[in-house]
Image (cartoon, helix red, strand yellow):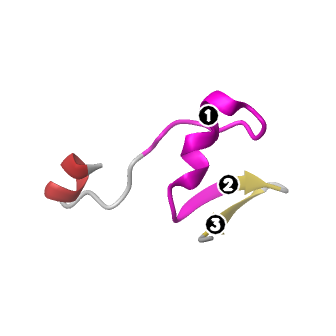
Amino acid sequence: IKFCQQKEIKFIYLGYWIEGVNAMSYKARFKPHQIFHDNAWNLVTR
């Protein structure tokens, strides 16, 4: 993330996230992020 900040890269792809999989739960803590739900991308800010 620091590398992207230094290079002024606005977005980073952390890979997919599966709700309920503990090994992936850290990804949901990065804000803001988007999730694909109900056939649309939704912004998550909280």
Element under disc 3: strand
| Mark closer to the chain start, 1 or 3 | 1
Give left or right: position of 42 versus 12. Answer: right
Bounds of the magenta segment: 13-35
Residue wearing tag 1: 24
Say which residue appears at 62% left-offset and 28% top-offset.
Answer: 23
Vertical placement of 1 versus 8: above or below?
A: above
* Type of amino acid at the residue the image marks with label 1: Met
* Type of amino acid at the residue the image marks with label 2: Ile
Label 3 neighbourhood size at 10 Å, few (<14), some (14-19), many (20+)?
few
Element under disc 1: helix
| Mark closer to the chain start, 1 or 2 | 1
Q: CA distance from mark 1 to mark 3?
A: 16 Å
Say which residue appears at 73% left-offset and 31% top-offset.
Answer: 21
Residue 9 lies in what quarter of the image?
Answer: bottom left
Label 1 neighbourhood size at 10 Å, few (<14), some (14-19), many (20+)?
few
Residue placed most toward the observer, 10 or 44: 44
x then y, percent, for residue 4: 24, 51
Label 2 neighbourhood size at 10 Å, few (<14), some (14-19), many (20+)?
few
x then y, percent, for residue 13: 44, 44
Residue wearing tag 2: 35
Cβ–Cβ under 8 Å for marks 3 and 2: yes
x then y, percent, for residue 39: 80, 54
Disc on res. 3: none
Q: Quadrant of the C terminus?
A: bottom right
x then y, percent, for residue 19: 75, 41
Residue wearing tag 3: 44
Element under disc 2: strand
Q: CA distance from mark 1 to mark 2?
A: 14 Å
